Image: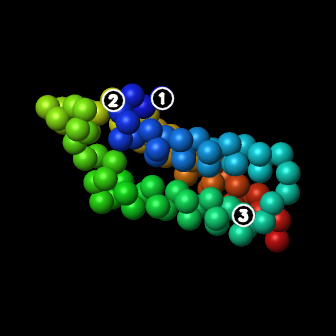
Amino acid sequence: MPTSQHLDGIHHELMDIARECTKMYHREFSEDEVRKLQDRVQVIDEKYKQGVINEKDEDYPEENPYEQPGQAEVAEELEKVHNSLRYLLTRVKQ
């Protein structure tokens, strides 16, 4: 779990999306349901691309923004969620 307050909100959002993905593994679902989760992830992706996730944390001003506590964990969580969503799209009932 991220130790930086700056990353906590992002971590919690990713964990919520991951839980939704896990629930969907065990039932039928629509492409629209997956797209809604992808939209939520896209917001996080945009923050990542804009550098919001990588900004210097006020609690750790001397640190490289890419070495913030929790940065690697959030990047890993983001990758896992993307992989889960890709997998779910392959299982969509047409």
User: Which residue is at 49% across, 62% downward?
Assistant: 42
Q: Label 3's element?
A: helix
Q: With 13 as the anchor, is 61 left or right in this view?
A: left
Q: With 59 as the anchor, is 53 left or right in this view?
A: right
Q: Residue furthest left?
A: 62
Residue 79 lies, in percent from the top left, at: 49, 45
User: Which residue is at 55% across, 59% downward?
Assistant: 40
State if disc 1 and disc 3 touch (CB < 8 Å).
no
Q: Nearer the viewer, residue 4 or 36?
A: 4
Q: Earlier in the sequence, mark 2 or mark 3?
A: 3
Spatial separation of the CA atoms under disc 2 and disc 3: 32 Å
Residue 68 lies, in percent from the top left, at: 29, 33
Residue 2 lies, in percent from the top left, at: 42, 31
Q: Label 2's element?
A: loop
Question: Looking at the picture, which amino acid does disc 3 mark?
Answer: Glu
Question: Looking at the picture, which amino acid does disc 1 mark?
Answer: Met
Q: Label 1's element?
A: loop
Q: How is the structure coloured here?
A: rainbow
Q: Nearer the viewer, residue 37 or 90?
A: 37
Residue 27 lies, in percent from the top left, at: 85, 51
Q: Residues within 10 Å of mark 2 (few under 14, many from 20)?
A: some
Vertical order, 87 against 30 (above or below): above
Residue under pointer 3: 33
Residue under pointer 1: 1
